[in-house]
Amino acid sequence: MDELSTVGKSVPRVDGMEKVTGTAKFTNDFALPRMLYGKVLRSPYPHARIGRIDVSQASKLPGVKAVLTGKDNPEGRMGVVLDRPIVAEDEVRFVGEAVALVAAESLEVAEEALDLIDVEYEELPAIFDAEEAMKPHSEVVVQLGHHLLPSIPAYAGHNIPFATAEETPNVYRAFHIQEGDIEQGFRESDVVLENRFVFTRTQHCAMEPHCAMARPEPDGGFTVWASEQHPFEAQLFLSRIFKLPVPKVRVIAPFIGGAFGGKLFVMGMPWAMMLARRTGRPVKVVYSREEVFVDGYSDVPVVIYIKDGVKKDGRLWARSVKAVINCGAYSGRVLLLTGSMVMGATVNYRIPHFWWDSYCVATNEPVSGSFRGFGGVQLIHAVESQMDMLAKAIGMDAYKFRRMNLYKEGEINLLGQPTHAVEAEECLDKVAEWIGWGKKPEKREEGPWRIGRGISAQGKGGLVSPYSLAEVKVHFDGTIEIRHGATEVGQGCNTILSQIAAEEFQTPVGKVRQISGDTAVTPYDITSTANLTTFNTGNTVRRACQDAKRQIFEIAAERLKMKAEDLELKDGLIYTRGKTEAALKLGDIFVPGGGGTAKEERERILKKFGVDYMFCHGACALEVAVNTETGEVKVLRIAQCHDMGTPINPQACEAQIDSGNGFGVGRALYEEIVIENGVTVNPNFVDYKIPSMLEVPLGAEVSSMLPAGVPHEDGPYGGKGFGESTNCGISPAIAGALYDAVGIRMLDLPITRERVLGALKRVG
Amino acid sequence: MKMPLQFRVNGEDYEVYVEPWKTLLEVLRDELELTGTKAGCLAGECGTCTVIVDGKAVKSCLMLAPQAAGREIMTVEGLAQGGKLHPLQQAFIDHFAFQCGFCTPGMLMSSKALLDENPHPTADDVKEGLYGNFCRCTGYVKILEAVLAAGAKPRG
Ligand code: FES
Ligand code: FES
């Protein structure tokens, strides 16, 4: 495919003009006439029975238009198993749970009204530690009868049964897979190594706080503007919650100011809708930064036990993993992670004997959510740290040890899926070469600083979905309009999809117009998560374009008395193959009397792809300096390489890789939501540190590389998605580099100064 | 309780009536409907609300409306002149220096204040000038590139 004109080129992002001039509209940039401001009163207790709620004072405050409590709830609930009431009813189950809602003429009045609501609580015993909570016959039960709640239909392809039992009431879900004979595997291994890794809670910290605005419509429905990654899922959930026909809820997702998995699951929307329904006026609910930290569906705390067996010659022989996932007080989305986390241990390395158990456990901590990598950060940190330690134990180089165990093209992985179009080895080679693996760093020390290197590999799968739809409309002037349901969260999907349409129509990217993220006007899309958009939506856009072209050629062929196969399109002109003079303008076929108009037709992807998953692999190598007096760790240089099939827009791909650096360094070294007795004690950017420009390597110290680009057979132009995994390999490489520098092995994240100092003291 | 507030924003004179406890950010977004300036934390911690006040980069969520009286303010909407992008804006596009774009207005304003003071900054100058502006999407690599590129160009 060497004659591609747009795909494979670093065309500028199509949203550039809007984003640099301040005209790009995010949800909170919209305001409606007669709009009210909504605010949420939140529980101060991790677990309590709610007694009387007195709203009389708050209701009397001038400017207050509605004060609602759990009694005013709509019928439905939130969460994967529909267990979280929109507003708490008889009990609160975490600090920060919604207890009452206010709508007022101004934000100040709404906030003042919150202080006037009087709630009586009767405290109940609470439980925070997931390992404690999963013990049989736990005295504290977060939610009675949880296992009796209805489940959603099997999560896109993962047919995971709910394995819950009476005697473990806080275990919401268990997931198990196995391969070979694990005990035999350990018996046959020359070295067996077992460790426990602990991961605390972290926040996505998208720069845009969550926002939802709901307008009641005359037909009893709602229009909802929201910072939501998945408008179609939101539409479905909201219609269930409010018992409305699906089309009566219109969800519009304007530009989204970063998501990273944190803008899913109808956040804020039901509150705005309840208040709008009561007042008959539009209501906007904006989360404060503190609310984002407290009830922003942060990443899950996880404890991972991992036991590995390896042969002396370097072959990984057996691996067993037990993951205990702290789901928080309600199911949120984390139930799904119980299953999907397994990817981090199953798609990279060949292992004959494998055993996996994961448990999703309810506690009285805030509800956990999905996060870029969906369990990958934690699992890959554990797996890759083990890989370092195993290599050391058998006296092998960490890079060579990884490389020899990687799956090769065509091998069936532990998920039963073929390895296809992955360039895991190339990625690993490229980063190793860039960092100078195997050679001595120029300096090993300087004053109190010690320098070391680390390396990691990672893999992640994404479900190939038949549920992304697109429509293509060809306008009179040759403008190609594509309508799709994917959302531009910053990842650049609008640019990639424009490029694909431009390629198909042989027209400049500027001639492509997009309409997206509005459930009323765009066709369905399963979700803009999990590395899926380029692959699934990209494929669909391409097919819809081909279908539109087919129809255009049919009409033109009739007009020109020619065969449709002999026609081609370029820059809005229709040519006879081989001729340099155009036969027709695209607009000509719209002229009546010439065979009708181009028919607008939704493309239905009924045929499933040959495989269920596509996999993207990558590698990271880096160099750190650690200060032996203060415990400070600095990443000096970093290289990442990720496979993506054919890159549709190389520079945008590089930008996605860079993007993982900031995330990964923050997660590895600083980020941690501190929760004491259920209370989030650091819900702001002063106490929860995310990297600024000073904490990440930049310029020549960074290399974001693409491998040669083996086209994926089923991907659009051979492309596939990868952006979600670029943050997953950094922490294990940092941990490896620390070991290299000063001989300490940090198992848990984040690797804070205090922890480094503590570990240094222990080794003396 | 509203008070009159006169100031200049993006070269235009304004007189608005606002409560004295409103922040400049609120006045810009809610009264003037200049929503390019973003509210990421309302506590001076993220930099998404950065505007230029009398030539200096200021976090507008920390400045009260009365403090803005009589001052000359520039927001991201005022950066392009006569339909032509400012070199920084062009550099941000050319270098893929944004993804979601939420930090971009603040980032551009901090960068402009920096370049106005120091037209040819080094990488360290840029880091020093922009560390108060968080970006969660880009890893900062391309932002630094863009600002350095805009700084390297002779500017009119
Ligand atoms: S909103 Fe002003 S610094 Fe964050
Ligand atoms: S581009 Fe999204 S925060 Fe900077």
Image (tube, coloured by chain):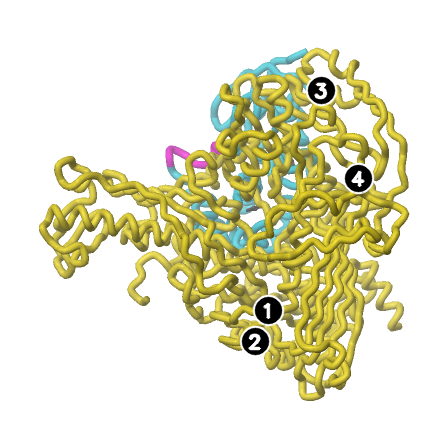
Chain colours: A yellow, B cyan
Residue designated by label 1: A347
SS at mark 1 in the image: loop
Real-space CA distance between mark 1 and mark 3, rounded to the nearest whole angstrom = 51 Å
Real-space CA distance between mark 1 and mark 4, rounded to the nearest whole angstrom = 36 Å
Please state the chain letter of the residue tagged with numbered disc 4 in the rendered image.
A
Name the quadrant containing residue A163: bottom right
Q: Are marks 1 and 2 on the same chain?
A: yes
Q: Crowding near pointer 1: few (<14 within 10 Å), some, many (20+)?
A: many
Real-space CA distance between mark 4 and mark 3, rounded to the nearest whole angstrom = 21 Å
Report the residue at 80% width, 33% height from top.
A43
Q: Are marks 2 and 4 on the same chain?
A: yes
Secondary structure predominantly adopted by residues drawn in magenta: loop
Vertical order, A331 against A301 (above or below): above
Residue designated by label 3: A67
Q: Are marks 4 and 3 on the same chain?
A: yes
SS at mark 2 in the image: loop
Quadrant into which the N terminus of chain A falls: bottom left
Report the disc number at residue A407.
Answer: 2
Residue designated by label 4: A94
Region of the chain picked out in magenta, as a range: B76-83
Q: Is residue B57 magenta?
A: no
Counting from the top left corner in percent of width and height, residue A304 is at: 76, 63
Q: Are marks 1 and 2 in contact (CB under 8 Å)?
A: yes
